[in-house]
Image (cartoon, rainbow, N blue to C red):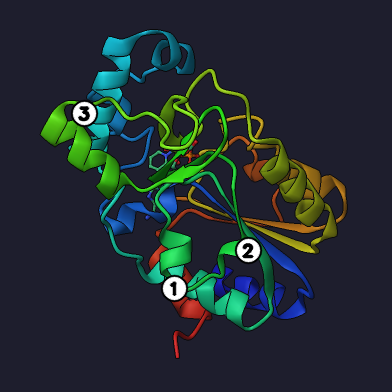
């Protein structure tokens, strides 16, 4: 049996699957991943959460990067991999998509927002660090570029930051709790495009496996969790999923 036939069989047998995605599902949309050569942190140093909060120059630099889309995280379109995942959700096969990505492409591909669990936040809008109010980037951009104003909250004057989880920032408790619940409720856990080295997110596949779910890893390069998986496919996500999930 080929690996795609085995994947089709595992999907057919699953009653409640969970998809877990990393930067690798978005490379086919033109967004570089983290750890490949040419990845974003080979070009610029990350700005840590504490630096953003305590240093105005770092805040300015962070907003400059955001409005110049320096990391290339926004403005891309979903690819075949995202669309196949959306089909699996639509057919009721996949209950939730747990993602480390911040590019909003699962929602853009048609997965209802309530079924997307974002562990590292979302780069397509901003929130107030004090009161949590949402701010749209287009509005903030006008005053940043036009009047050189570093964004502050319109409601409480607190610091505003893109809704991503920065290095040194605490993981968001509600998505973490939901991700754990979905992981424990699934009978098939499908990893798509993650090197599985960023913890605590990378703990979910093993949790699923220990809890009795089947584990599938589709990733171009080997990961340390490959030995625990029921099926490992070292190939591109789009073509692999398209072979087992008809898009119409
Ligand atoms: P990673 O860069 O560590 O790993 C990505 C993996 O995907 C690599 O092992 C690579 O071999 C594989 N890959 C790349 N393209 C592939 C393809 N087309 N098909 C199959 N496999 C492919 O990414 P990670 O595990 O997500 O962890 C790093 C962090 O990167 C995450 O926390 C995430 O927040 C952040 N990030 C997000 C984006 C995004 O939102 N699109 C982009 C870059 C980084």
Vertical relation: 169 (above or below) 50: below
Task: Look at mark 1 in the image and give the residue it sits on.
Answer: 83
Which residue corresponds to the image point at 31% horizontal and 12% vertical from the top-left?
Answer: 56
Q: Are marks 1 and 2 in contact (CB under 8 Å)?
A: no
> Where residue 185 sits in the image (x, y, percent)?
84, 59
Front position among marks 1 and 2 = 2
Q: Is residue 233 left or right of residue 117?
A: left
CA–CA distance in space, label 1 to label 3: 32 Å
Q: Is residue 130 above or below residue 137?
A: above
Q: Is residue 170 above or below residue 184?
A: above
Q: Residues within 10 Å of mark 2 (few under 14, many from 20)?
A: few
1 or 3: tag closer to the N-terminus: 3
* Viewer-side residue, 245 vs 21: 21
Q: Position of residue 12 (x, y in %)?
A: 70, 80
The residue sitting at the left extreme is 146
- The location of residue 48, given as percent across then percent down, is 43, 16
Q: Secondary structure at mark 3?
A: helix
Counting residues from the N terminus, which is met first, the one under dot 3 or under dot 2? 3
Disc 1 packing (10 Å; few <14; some 14–19; many ≥20): many
Judging by the rendered image, the residue that carries numbered circle 2 is 114
Give the percent coordinates (x, y) of residue 49: 47, 18
* Mark 3 and mark 2: Cα distance apart in space: 31 Å
Residue wearing tag 3: 64
> For numbered disc 2, what is the local secondary structure?
helix
Q: Is residue 63 left or right of residue 164?
A: left
The residue drawn where x is 26% and y is 49% is 138
């Amino acid at each position: 049996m080929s690996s795609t036939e085995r994947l089709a069989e595992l999907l057919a047998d699953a009653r409640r699957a969970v998809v877990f995605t990393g930067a690798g599902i978005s490379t086919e949309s033109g967004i570089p991943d983290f750890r490949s050569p040419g990845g974003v942190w080979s070009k610029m140093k990350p700005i840590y959460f504490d630096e953003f909060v305590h240093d105005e120059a770092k805040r300015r630099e962070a907003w400059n990067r955001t409005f110049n889309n320096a990391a290339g995280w926004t403005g891309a379109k979903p690819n075949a991999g995202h669309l196949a995942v959306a089909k699996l959700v639509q057919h009721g096969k996949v209950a939730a998509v747990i993602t480390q990505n911040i590019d909003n492409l699962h929602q853009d591909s048609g997965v209802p927002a309530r079924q997307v669990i974002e562990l590292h936040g979302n780069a397509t809008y901003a929130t107030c660090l004090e009161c949590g109010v949402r701010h749209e980037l287009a509005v903030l951009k006008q005053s940043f570029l036009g009047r050189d104003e570093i964004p502050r909250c319109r409601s409480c004057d607190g610091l505003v930051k893109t809704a991503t989880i920065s290095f040194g920032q605490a993981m968001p408790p509600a998505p973490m709790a939901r991700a754990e619940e979905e992981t424990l409720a699934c009978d098939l856990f499908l990893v798509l495009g993650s090197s599985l080295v960023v913890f605590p997110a990378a703990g979910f596949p093993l949790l699923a496996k220990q809890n009795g779910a089947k584990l599938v890893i589709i990733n171009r390069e080997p990961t340390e969790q490959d030995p625990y998986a029921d099926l490992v496919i070292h190939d591109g996500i789009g073509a692999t999923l398209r072979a087992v999930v008809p898009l119409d």
